[in-house]
Image (cartoon, rainbow, N blue to C red):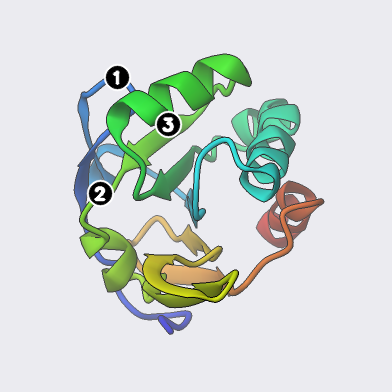
Amino acid sequence: MLESGQQAPSFELPNHAGETISLGDFEGRVVVYFYPRADTPGCTTEACDFRDSWDEFTARGVPVLGISDDSVSDLASFREKHDLPFELLSDESGEVASAYDSYGEKKMFGRTFDGVFRNTFVVAPDGTVERVFENVSPDGHAAEILSALE
């Protein structure tokens, strides 16, 4: 797992609108959160929690980037359906999630498959990892991040 003080892996990924977004596009702190699947119960809870706290993130000048291995079209539908104000990025290959130690083998309902782990990283203005939240609970996670930003 990446640790505080390590350089955050840079990336360029398509967002929900198909536009290329990179970590370097942002100044200051950035919240990068990885989630397993758009429009599933836990991921919807987590995304809506960030949405409902969006004014507080904006007031702090901290953008939120949600990354999953969903397609751009799935992200567009998810974002529109739940009125999400932040960037959703498509990492279909899992390459970026892997660089953040947030992708690998999972087991569910007797199946084994590769997928995204629910981890969050606060990236500091100098591009290093400031905070790591591993295997987070979706409910109340935005408040946890806001508290850590103080």
Residue topped by disc 1: 17
Q: Earlier in the sequence, mark 2 or mark 1?
A: 1
Residue drawn 67% across the image and 66% down it: 136
Asked whether the beta carbons under mark 2 and mark 1 sit within 8 Å of each other, the answer is no
Element type at marker 3? strand
Residue 147, position in %: x, y? 77, 56
Pointer 2: what residue?
Answer: 92
Along the polypeptide, which appears first: circle 3 or circle 2?
Answer: 3
Amino acid at dot 3: Glu
Q: Nearer the viewer, residue 135 or 85?
A: 135
Q: Closer to us: mark 2 or mark 1?
A: 2
Residue 12 position in % (x across, y down)? 18, 45
Lower position in the chain sequence, tag 1 or tag 3: 1
- The residue depicted at 76 percent of the width and 58 percent of the height is 144
Residue closest to the far front: 110
Vertical side of 82 occupied by 45: above or below: below
Amino acid of disc 1? Ala
Is 70 or 124 nearer to us in this picture?
70
Q: Which residue is mark 3?
A: 87
Between circles 1 and 3, the one closer to the viewer is 1
Give the spatial CA distance, label 2 vs label 1: 15 Å
| Amino acid marked by disc 2 | Glu
